[in-house]
Amino acid sequence: MAILSSPPPSFTLFTAFRRFTVDEYHRMMDTGILNDEDKVELLEGYVVEKMPRNPPHDVVIQRLNKRLTRLNLVGWEVRVRSAITLPDSEPEPDLTVARGDDHTFANRHPGPPELGTLIEVADTTLARDRHDKGRIYARSQVAVYWIVNLVESQIEVYTNPSGSGAAAAYGTRTDFRAGDSVPLVLDGLAIARIAVDDVLG
């Protein structure tokens, strides 16, 4: 489904009439304007198409999900390709570590106070994940954001979000490559480490 307008320059592969609120986006789903067959998400008020996934992308998600689940994160839920609700967006990160359990989000999506770490796996979406989603997540004060960068074979960890509007950004970026281990930080504490080689093979 395509909805027409003038989205920001980085949103060049999709179109929209105008910006929508999160409530309007929910109503489009509730009334059937959007359905499960529409591969879209809401980013800064724009209904945008999600890129199709390829086998390398999917296998990395599977590897990460296995490793995160094996950690038995008490008080945290590992969610795969599930929506989160932010003030002007409802993206669907590849993986989310959210505060709660399998009952917490039975009737709603996690919001900013419940988001421990967000993870996007990026190849063709690398620019969008770095700039657009990075800005969106930083503006919502998501403390830790990972990009598993398949193009450059590294995991980029973004921390110290600040700013508002278009100026929102992460203050720190740390790149982890082959031989490194990435700390999983929740509530400011590194509770485990995940080897880059185990994720990127």
Image (cartoon, rainbow, N blue to C red):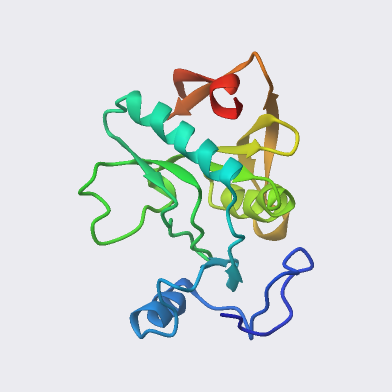
Asked whether residue 60 is in view, the answer is yes
Which residue reaches farthest top? 179
Q: Is residue 24 above or below residue 92?
A: below
Occupied quadrant, residue 37: bottom left
In the picture provided, is 13 more to the left or to the right than 41? right
- The residue under the point 46% across, 43% down is 95
- The residue under the point 70% across, 55% down is 128
If the image is split into quadrants, where does the C terminus sit? top right
Which residue reaches farthest front? 55
Asked whether residue 188 is in view, the answer is no
Q: Position of residue 113 (x, y in %)?
A: 40, 46
Q: Is residue 129 above or below residue 183?
A: below
Q: How many numbered markers are drawn?
A: 0
Which residue reaches farthest left? 103
Residue sitting nearer the eye, 3 or 22 = 3
- The residue under the point 42% across, 35% down is 65
Q: Is residue 9 above or below residue 181?
A: below
Occupied quadrant, residue 72: top left
If the image is split into quadrants, where does the N terminus sit? bottom right
In the picture provided, is 194 more to the left or to the right than 151? left
Q: Position of residue 149 (x, y in %)?
A: 67, 37
Residue sitting nearer the eye, 162 or 51 = 51
Q: Position of residue 175 (x, y in %)?
A: 70, 26
Q: Is residue 3 above or below residue 125?
A: below
In the picture provided, is 124 more to the left or to the right than 81? right
Q: Position of residue 123 (x, y in %)?
A: 69, 46
- The residue under the point 55% across, 27% down is 199
